[in-house]
Amino acid sequence: MQIMITHGRLAKTHVLQLGRWQLLGLALGLLAGMLVLSGVVYHLIFVKAAREGWPVVSQVVKLVVKDEFAQRDRYMRENLEAMARRVGEMQARLVQLEAMGERVSGLAGLKPEEIKLSEKQPGGQGGPFVPMLPPEQPTVQDILQAIDWLDELTAHRADVFTLIESRLFEEQMQALMVPSTKPVDGPTSSAFGFRSDPFTGRSALHTGLDFPAAPGTPIKAAAGGVVIAAEHHPAYGQMIDVDHGNGLVTRYAHASKLLVQRGDIVKRGQVIAQVGSTGRSTGPHLHFEVLMNGVHQNPAKFLAGDGRTPQRRVAGAARTAGTHAH
């Protein structure tokens, strides 16, 4: 682009050569200047007119400002209504979550009073409680109160589910500590109860279950626990005692080889010994006992898998017994 500048007939003509980028820069400079000029005009004329109350200009300014405030108010109202709908949906979901939490807590064995919000707190109490939003035209204060209520309910629900998780984990651990897994695969040859003693022929109490098996057959822990004895006994031969907690102990007797020692922690199904015929035994087999607080129980009650909870199974298996017989 070329621009020619002359001052008269005899004056020399000046030619300005403007490139594309120079022209663009000039346009941007003019635009910036216009913006600055408009800002100065607005500040010096319109703002001053609004403050001093000029007859015409002040009315125009008031109309513009009023329209801006109306648009801003409408925008805020639409946002508040959208937030109110969202908060209402969250409230409904939390109420459903609360109902589900109460059902799940019942399955976990929690009592209703254990999961309810505390009603008795030290000191005075009072003030309004607004758990739900008003049906029409909620205010910012209404939404803030609803959000505070949602925050409180969410924290309580989180605590409830933490308690449920803890209780279920406790149940799982108790189930793992109950001897309900057969220590040796296969049928039993002698049940718990009175029988004819294989050595004397007299009636005597058999305090466990006998699992006949070939020598060297793996003997598995019926449940997880701690080995409290791994030794030779005159009557039991090579034997292992595993403590499962709450006074519950299992005994594995007549083994040919012990694979754990006292103090070891064993898991359910872990191989702890091998079948043998040591001690007071007439042939290779595992003699398996269950003791509750030192009193012999019928192991079949634990191995039956009758569907009862671990606590009920332990309680139902408790019964007294007499002297040892093998």
Image (cartoon, rainbow, N blue to C red):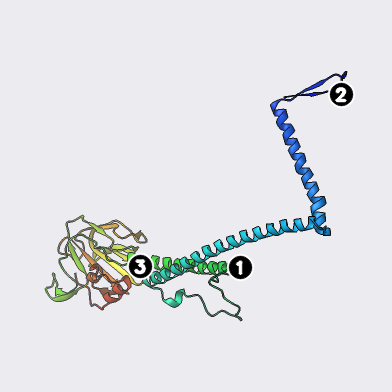
- The image shows a total of numbered marks equal to 3
Label 1 vs label 2, nearer the camera: 2
State the residue in front, 173 or 307. Answer: 307
Q: CA distance from mark 2 to mark 3?
A: 107 Å
The label on residue 228 is none
Q: Secondary structure at mark 3?
A: helix
Decide: is 84 above or below 32: below
State the residue in front, 269 or 3. Answer: 3
State the residue in front, 22 or 282. Answer: 22
Q: Amino acid at mark 2?
A: His
The percent coordinates of residue 119 (x first, y second) are 52, 79
- In-image side of 243 versus 92 (left or right): left
Query: In this figure, which residue is indicated by the disc labeled 1?
Result: 139
Label 2 vs label 3, nearer the camera: 2
The percent coordinates of residue 181 (x first, y second) are 26, 63
Q: In which image quadrant can residue 226 be found?
A: bottom left
Q: Secondary structure at mark 2?
A: loop
| Residue 243 visible | no
* Disc 2 packing (10 Å; few <14; some 14–19; many ≥20): few
The label on residue 174 is 3
Q: Earlier in the sequence, mark 3 or mark 1?
A: 1
State the residue in front, 26 or 281. Answer: 26
Residue at (58% x, 61% y) in the render: 78
Q: Secondary structure at mark 1?
A: loop
Q: In which image quadrant can residue 124 be found?
A: bottom right
Query: In this figure, which residue is indicated by the disc labeled 2?
Result: 7
Q: Earlier in the sequence, mark 1 or mark 2?
A: 2
The percent coordinates of residue 126 (x first, y second) are 60, 80
Q: Earlier in the sequence, mark 2 or mark 3?
A: 2
The percent coordinates of residue 70 (x first, y second) are 66, 60
